[in-house]
Structures are given as structure tokens and as C-alpha cells.
Amino acid sequence: MRKGVLELCILSILSHNEMYTSDLLATLKEAQLLVVEGTIYPLLSRLKNEGLLKYRWEESPTGPPRKYFSLTEKGISTQKTLKITWQQLSESVNRIIK
């Protein structure tokens, strides 16, 4: 269940703008979703292989080039679908636990 939620969170963050992995991790941390690099890198690779993400390389003035991720058209569509599913699930669970 957490895996699906994390996927939704990553796609939602990237739906606003492209992002470097460490910035993505910082955004998740700000939301109090603690995710380690060992979790995020395989997930980003899987999402890219599924055609949901694309990336571009940008030179860094302080080290090796950086990979910036963004959504593909399929990623945008998937994010919208996952968001609707999450909202329906959340409403159902909230009705039960009240």
C-alpha cells in the first residue's frame, strides 16, 4: 500500500515541475514522508521504464551531471487516475473510521 502511495506522491510532485532526485527527497521529507535513496532510485527507474517519467541531464557546477525527472504524457494520465483512486479510497476509509 505504501508503495502505491509513494508512486502517487512522486508523480504528483513531478506534475508541478521537473526535479532532481535530492530535491524530490527533500520535498517528501517536508511532507513527513521519510524515504531513503535506496527506495527512491529503484522506484524512479521503474517509473521511467514504465514510460511514466523521462529525464534530462544537466551539468552541475559542483560535481557530476544531474538527472532531472519530469512526467511523460502517460505519467500525467497515470497521476490523474491514481489521484482519483486515492481520493475515493480516502473518503471510504474516513467514513469507516469516523
Image (cartoon, grey):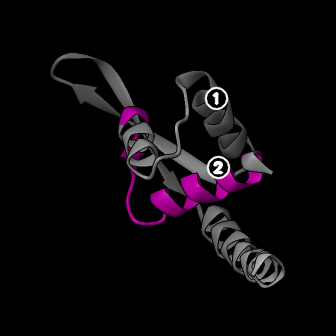
Residue 86 locus on image (x, y percent):
72, 72
> How far, Cα to Cα, is label 1 from label 2?
10 Å
Q: On screen, 53 above or below 43?
A: below
Residue holding disc 2: 6
Question: Quick one: label 1, few (<14), some, or many (20+) residues within 10 Å?
Answer: few
Q: Are marks 1 and 2 in contact (CB under 8 Å)?
A: yes
Check disc 2 and give the amino acid type: Leu
The disc label shown at residue 39, or none: 1
- The numbered mark, 1 or 2, whose residue comes first in the sequence reads 2
SS under mark 1: helix
Which of these two is toward me, 7 or 55? Answer: 7
Residue 79 locus on image (x, y percent):
64, 68
What residue lies at 38% left-to-right and 33% top-to-bottom?
22
Q: Which residues are magenta?
A: 3-22
Which of these two is toward me, 81 or 65? Answer: 81
What residue lies at 68% left-to-right and 45% top-to-bottom?
47
Residue 4 vs residue 62: left or right? right
